[in-house]
Each structure stands twice: as structure tokens, then as C-alpha cells.
Amino acid sequence: MDAEQKFTSRTWPESPEKTTLEGKNKFLGFWLFLGGETVLFASLFATYLALKDKVPSDDHALAIDMFELPLVFIMTMLLLTSSLTSVYAMYHMKNYNFQKMKTWLIITVGLGLAFLGFEIYEFYHYVHAFEHTFTSSAFGSAFYTLVGFHGAHVVVGLGWFLLLLIRNTNRGLNLYNAPKFFVASLYWHFIDVVWVFIFTVVYLMGMVG
Amino acid sequence: MSTVAQKQGFLAVLWDYLTTVDHKKIAILYLASGGFFFLVGGIEAMIIRIQLAVPDNNFVSAGLYNEILTMHGTTMIFLAAMPLLFAFMNAVVPLQIGARDVAFPFLNSLGFWLFFFGGIFLNLSWFLGGAPDAGWTSYASLSITSEGHGIDFYVLGLQISGAGTLIAGINFLVTIINMRAPGMTYMRMPLFTWSTFVASALILFAFPPLTVGLFLMMFDRMFGANFFDVSMGGNTIIWEHLFWIFGHPEVYILILPAFGIFSEIFATFSRKRLFGYAAMVFATVLIGFLGFMVWAHHMFTVGLGPTANAIFAVATMAIAVPTGVKIFNWMLTMWGGSIVFTTPMLYAVAFIPSFTAGGVTGVMLASAAADYQYHDTYFVVAHFHYVIVGGVVLGLLAGTHFYWPKMFGTMLNEFLGKITFWLFLIGFHATFFVQHFLGLMGMPRRIWKFLDGQGLNLFNLISTIGAVFMAVAVLVLVYNIIITQIKNVRVGNDPWGDGRTLEWAIASPPPFYNFKQLPLVRGLDPYWIEKMEGNTKMTPAEPVGDIHMPNNSFIPFVMSLGLFIAAFGAMYQVDWRASDGESFVWAIPVLIIGMLITIGSMAVRSLKDDHGYHIHKEDLLNDDEGGRD
């Protein structure tokens, strides 16, 4: 089957991401990759929990001193909403509506960028208000590594969406690029799930001491 | 490789290998580079044994000894054993399941080049100020205070090659799940495919903890973090946990494919179906699960407490059960079989008692209370060499002889093969058997020299003589390979005469598209079934048609090269900061350029469509007369 074959919304298959063998392989391979990523973040969470509030002397700020719910709440809402908008995008992808898919993906990217902006502000705030840096304590190293790894995943996810949008702006959907959009959105959901755990383990548990 | 390919110039062949995405050529790349690193690791082993041949020896200095010992372990595990196993997985697994290639040919190539550049980077440490010297486990309490860049080479080199391994693992999982030929159900898959499948799953879940551990070490040593600095609130035990959560599954990643190779060999040369196939599959999967629940048995003396030690001790002993199932199934496969003692079969037969001895000492070490005596002695050295050399290396040597005709179309000399076998087997037992007693007598592992008059002289000398036997055995093998390739006597599809699985149903080496028509699999050992019914080849599952093939690509090489360059920048920016920006001003730019090369080539890969090409039906039919590449 020619991957660049043109479709109409009537001939477009029900699961375009899994119609070709390449798509099926990509779909499964990416799920497996996310399995490995889960272990990666599990290791980072374990490290964070072992080093939480481990500082060299009493004058260092601890989790309970720094974290503030309103900021983290806004970030959580932004990222959760962006996951929802990427679902809308995939809904339109499955209905062969390229324009609407693009619109929702652009909204997703916008929400992701807003999240990233807040995260940069948050780090800036901790560094300047609390002298809580990557090198100031084991706690600092563990915090910025865990949350920073997540932030780096957000950057990669945004870059990925943008690259796909730019590359495919004028050529519509086909069975070659549909799996690409689909796995990028899977990645985005994964980033969202990791954030839910960061919200719980780092921030909520951090605020109760 | 047809006759046309052999007439190409050297540069054309080189370019072909640099850009290839064909699993059979990638297998040869893995075999060649894994073999090279195996020789390097072997030379390091010989230096260790020469230093310990006599008491109070001064063949190498203490610091250099530490570097050699570290590099011996690291090289053998990451750069020799794993790639050599990947060589056979790549060469054989797609053929065994009746596939035309792996699921992700591009990633297959990327995985190889990442491993290759990681390995080269690690070994460049010898020429750039000294190799890593904190042992292959590189415990943080030791490695964060190690001076120079040795540990940085370890961290960055393993990070790069580890990424390649993870990619290869995912690739094999998807290949085995999605690419099986019609009729090849899970319970008809050959044991080598099954063990590759389970080992790949272990890679997928075991390598990320290593990645994290290496990142933490990298951040500590190169970017001022404090994960392992106790005075800053850090904790060095985190490294030990992360390392062994990876490290224990790693030994099963090594041994399971070796088990798979032996299972194929036992069935082939006993000319009998593998005894207890379903039990073998179940045991393989069970070992895979249990492999993740035993990591703390490496840390009994850390002080995790009696409860943790007891749990991990019992879990460890439990692994002996599925392994025992396998041992008995292999023996019962031979029972009543019409056995031919070819070189691979000799290795397989010798493997059973050798590996079992290693398993028995494993159960001894698993007793947490007794382990306080054995810990960090030569008893441990003897144990893991019995399982790794007596299991994995014997498996690799057996696989080399067994699959050589399928990979290269020539047959290694059987007489020389048997000489290699006997020299290696005698040398192996002479080297490591006595080390059990050295350990029980109290000789600590990793020690640079021992003193006269402690009763350690004789056994150390025997051990060194054994190592010489193994070295000679390897030289005979190298000679065997060279003369075999010079003579270049071509062999047919099934040179052993008793092939049971699909790879023996097609030419040696197979055409680049593997199967002109995908075979119809009618049961376990499909080729044997056809032979028993008097057929000379497989029943096709499809008519001859166009075959879709992937394009070659140079991008994997460039992507890996970018990380290789970036690693130098990451390492030398430490000196740049230490000198307050006076020297090494190029470090940060090099780091950035390297990363840009990698990210840029990823973007090129994403932006440029790569649809592959089709081999047309007419060309396939012409192939029957002459062949083209």
C-alpha cells in the first residue's frame, strides 16, 4: 500500500495509526519505549524521595518552606488541559479533519509553552528567593533533576509537535504521517501522567512536611 | 552478499557497511566489533593474571592494575558479551521467525553505532590521561573521589552505548511480536527467539535505572551536583541500588540468549525435538521475572537489615528452580537422541556441568549469613566467571561455530574448532576452579598483589597457567576464522544437515530480502517438519510479489558521532571551569556542536520522508538464475 495515497473522510481507515505495518510497529515500539521511560522516572522518583530535604545545614530551605500550591495548581491545570486538547486533535485525526487537528495541536503547544514558562519562573524563584540551587544540597540536585527531566521531556514534546506541524502543514493526512502524530500525542500524555505523580509526590507531599 | 558485491571496491564496501540497515550486515558489524573488544578485554585479563602469577609481583603498578581490572570487567560485559549476543540475535532471530528484516531497520543501525562510539569513547581513556579505576561497578563512594577523567569516560561511554542497547531491545521486542511469519505462533517460536524476547524485555526495564545512575554520577562529577556527597546530604547507597537494579537483570540479559543458543544446538545435534519445550519457555520467562527481584543480594553486607537480606536471599535461591528445569530438559533432550559431537555440541555438553557449578556457588552466595564470609573474595570472582565464562562465553563460542555458515556461507574448520574447545575448557577450569579455594582462604578480590608465605602461591600460579590455555584457544579460533575465510569454500542452506528451524531453509548467507516468499509455519521446528515429509524447502505462505525494503542511511552514524563529540565537551568543561576559563575554552562549544549534530540529524530524519523501495517481482524471479545485490 502506498503510504502517500490520498484518502477521503469516507475511505480513511478507522485506526490510521495502525493500518500499515510501519504504523503498527511504531505504535507498539513507542508503547514499549514508554514502559522504559516509566522505569526511568521511577528511578528518579526513588532518588528524590531518598534525598528529599537532605541538606548540609539548617539554614537551607526545605520543601515545606518553598512550595506554594497556587503556582503548582496553575501548572497542573495547564498541562492536564493540554492533554485534553491533544485528545481532541487525535479525535479529528481519526475523522480525517486535518485543519481541526492542526488547530487543536497548536492549542496544545500553546498550553505546553505556558506550562514551561511557569516552570522556568518557578525555578528562578527558588534560586533567588531561597538560594535553592542544583549544587546547594543533595535535595536541590534531586529536585531539579526530577522536575528538570520532566521539563526536558516537555521541551522535546513541544519540539516534536512543532516539527510535525511544520513538515505537514500543506500536505494533509496520510498513512505515513498519521502514526507520527499519534505517537507524539502518546508521548504528550505520558508527560502529563508523570506530572500528576510529580504534583503528588513532590508538591503535595512536600507541603505536608 | 552475492558475487557482485564482492567485486566492489573497498570504499564501496565500507560505505555499504556504514549506511547499512540490513540486519545480517549489522550482525557482522556487531560480531566484528564485539570480537575486537573481546580480544582487548582478554589482553587485560592476561595482564591481571601475569601480575598475580607470583607473589609480590611488580609487572604493573597498583594504579594501572586498578585501571586494567576495571576495564576488563566493563569491556567484557558491555562491549564484548552484549554485542556478540546482539550479533547472533540480529543474524538469526529475523530468520527464525520468518521475517524479511527487523521492525525498525534504521534504529537497528542506530543502536549499533551508539554502542560502537560508546565503546570507542570508553577505550580512548587509555590514551587520554588514564582509564576508569573504580571497578566495573564503579561504587560512588570510590568513583566520585577518583582523580582525572577515567570515571568520566566510564559514565559517558556507557551512557552512549547504553542508549544503543535500549534501542536494540525495543527493536527485538517489536520484531518478535509483529513480524512473525504466518503460522509462527508464540508457542512455535524457537527457544533462541524466546530467550531473545525475554532478554529484550529485561533490557527495556533494566537499562533505564543504569541511565539514571549514570546521569546522577555525571551530574555529580561534571556539573557540581551532590547526589553522592554525604557532606551535602547525599547518599552513596543510591548508586549501589540503581546499579544493581540494572546489574542483576543484566546477567540474565547475558545468559538467557546463551541458553537459547544451547537449546538450538542440543535439539539439532541430538536430532530430537527439544525436551519439555513449554517448560523451557515458562522457565525462561520466570527467570526474567525473578531476575528483577534479587538485586540486593549484591548488597548483603551494606546493612539493609535482616528482613531485607532474608527476602532477597530466598528470592535468589528461587531462581535455581527454573534454571534446574532447563538443565534437566537439556539432558533429557540428549537422552535417547542420536548425538553428533560437532564443535558446537561439545561446547553445549561442556556447558552443563560448568554452568551448574557456577549455579551451585550462586546458591551458596545467596545465603546472606554465609555471604559475609565470601563477600569481596576470590570466591565471588570464581562464581561469576563460572556462570559468565562457563555459560555466556561457551555459548558465544558455540554460537560462533554453529551460526558461522549462516552468517558467512563458509564452515569453520571442525578439527581446529575442537582444539579450541579442549584448550579453552581445560584453561577455563584450571583458571577459575582454584579461585574458589583462594577465596575461601581469604584472598580478597581486586587485590593488586599478594604476599609470599600465605599459602596462595600455588593456586595463583595454576590460575595463570589456565589463563594462558584460554588465550591460546582464542588464538587458534582467530587462525581458524582467517583460514576459513581465505579458503572460502561455500556451503549450502543446511550445512549441519540437521537444521530444524527456518534459518536453515534458506541460502547461506541469505539473500538481502531473506525470504522470497514468506514461509508457512506448520509447527515447532518447521523446517524439520518439512524434511520429515520429504520436502526440500518450506511451503510458501504467499505468491511471489513485490517486496518492500528500507533505504540505507548514513544518519545513524552521524547521530552517534554527535553524541561522541558532545561527550568530550561535557568532560573537558570541568577543566575549563577549574581553570576559571583560562584553558579548555573549546569545551563548551564542542559540547554544543556535538548536541546540535545529533539533534539536527534527528530533525533531518523526521523531516525527510523515507518510504523505502520495492524489489519487483520480475527481479526476484531473475534472482533464481544469477542473483543480484
Image (cartoon, coloured by chain):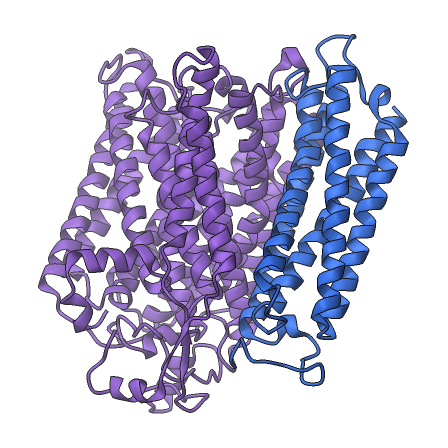
The residue depicted at 44 percent of the width and 47 percent of the height is B356
Q: Quadrant of the C terminus of chain B?
A: bottom left
Q: In the depicted view, which residue is nearer to us: A97 or B451? A: A97
Q: Quadrant of residue B417?
A: bottom left
Asked if residue B136 shows in the view, the reply is no
* Rendering quarter of residue B482: bottom left
Q: Residue at x 41, y 30 (%)?
A: B590
**Total marks drawn?**
0
Quadrant (top left/top right/bottom left/bottom right) for the N terminus of chain B: bottom left
B12 with respect to B67 (left or right) = left
Please say if B254 is above or below B571.
below
Q: Nearer the viewer, residue A186 or A41?
A: A186
Q: Nearer the viewer, residue B572 or B460?
A: B572
Residue B208: where, in percent of width, then height? 58, 42
Q: Position of residue B11 (x, y in %)?
A: 19, 56
Compared across the picture, whether B509 is left or right of B575 comes to: left
Please give the name of the residue rendered at 28% of the width and 57% of the height, measured from the top-left corner: B17
Residue B421 spot, x, y in % from top left = 23, 51
Tell me if residue B49 can be seen: yes
Vertical relation: B341 (above or below) B204: below
Where's residue B548, x and y in %? 42, 77
- Please tell me which residue is depicted at 77% across the width and 61% down the height of the picture: A87
Quarter of the view holding residue B174: bottom right
Letter of the chain in purple: B
Chain A tint as drawn: blue
